[in-house]
Image (cartoon, grey):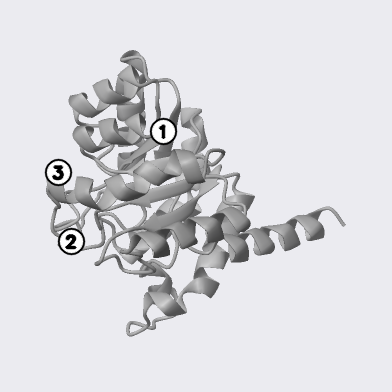
Amino acid sequence: MGILNITPDSFFNSTTHLPDTLNQIEKLKREKADIIDIGAESSRPGAKPLSINEEKQRLEPILKKLAVNFPNLFFSLDTYKPEIAEMGFFYGISMINDITGLQNKDMRTVIKKNKGSACIMHMQHTPETMQNNPTYSNVTKEVFDFLKNQTMIAKNEGISNLVIDPGIGFGKTPHHNLELIKNIDQFKKLNTPILLGVSRKSFISHTYKESTETAQDRLSGTIAACLYAYLKKVDILRVHDVQEIKKAMTTLNAIENA
């Protein structure tokens, strides 16, 4: 899954002008991204919520181009607002990537009505407050139980095409993130495809105690985390650097098959 941020305030690699956005989609297409995830509202730590109208104004110009310019690509939409999800389905979006984990019944209704797919992500609190002392007694169990519960609710309401995401960096300390990645295979018990988003996130810098390092410098750690997840049979890797991750996976496959 290639990341396409059309926000002025994401922590890495945003595009805010339509020509740049179209060029970025072309790049992800050349790099053979299987899914392109479009987000118009930043969910970085401390981010302020965006109004429905603001999100619509950012998204609609690019959504109008998708069916004409990229008819054969699979797009997901990173939003937690039912109104924006409805607009996305109208323009041909295939999946909703909901950071609030489908807790909004109206969102579930929109997805069911449009026969769409959905990604259920775990987040403690909101992007604005999620890194204010995140606390768990057992992070793997608590995230697992949340995803299990939300998956059951969605399936009982008729949504069958689901993906789960433990929400790396969303209301977790660096240690919580590492523990979730280490134990990611436990989530296979839910019999639902797993998505993992580790790309260039700050927990990577903490692993080698570089607190001043920026997202620009975290590619090597991203590749390491993605390869670990790949070996653990994670189904979808949400990344900024599609080509680099694919090359690393190709090399790993070559070693395994030698």
Q: Residues within 10 Å of mark 3 (few under 14, many from 20)?
A: few
Amino acid residing under circle 3: Ile
**Discs 3/1, front:** 1
The earlier-in-sequence mark between 3 and 2 is 2
Q: Residues within 10 Å of mark 2 (few under 14, many from 20)?
A: some
Residue 197 location (% of width, % of height): 43, 54
Looking at the image, residue 73 sits to the left or right of residue 54; the answer is right
Q: Which mark is residue 92?
A: 1
Q: 203 above or below 29?
A: below
Q: Which mark is residue 50?
A: none
Q: Residues within 10 Å of mark 1 (few under 14, many from 20)?
A: some
Q: 257 above or below 149?
A: below
Residue 47 location (% of width, % of height): 18, 61
The earlier-in-sequence mark between 1 and 2 is 2
- How far is mark 1 from mark 2, CA to CA? 28 Å
Q: Secondary structure at mark 1?
A: loop
Q: Which mark is residue 47?
A: 2
Q: Secondary structure at mark 2?
A: loop
Say which residue label 3 marks: 52
Looking at the image, residue 247 sits to the left or right of residue 62; the answer is right
Pick whichever, 121 or 83, lies toward us.
Answer: 83
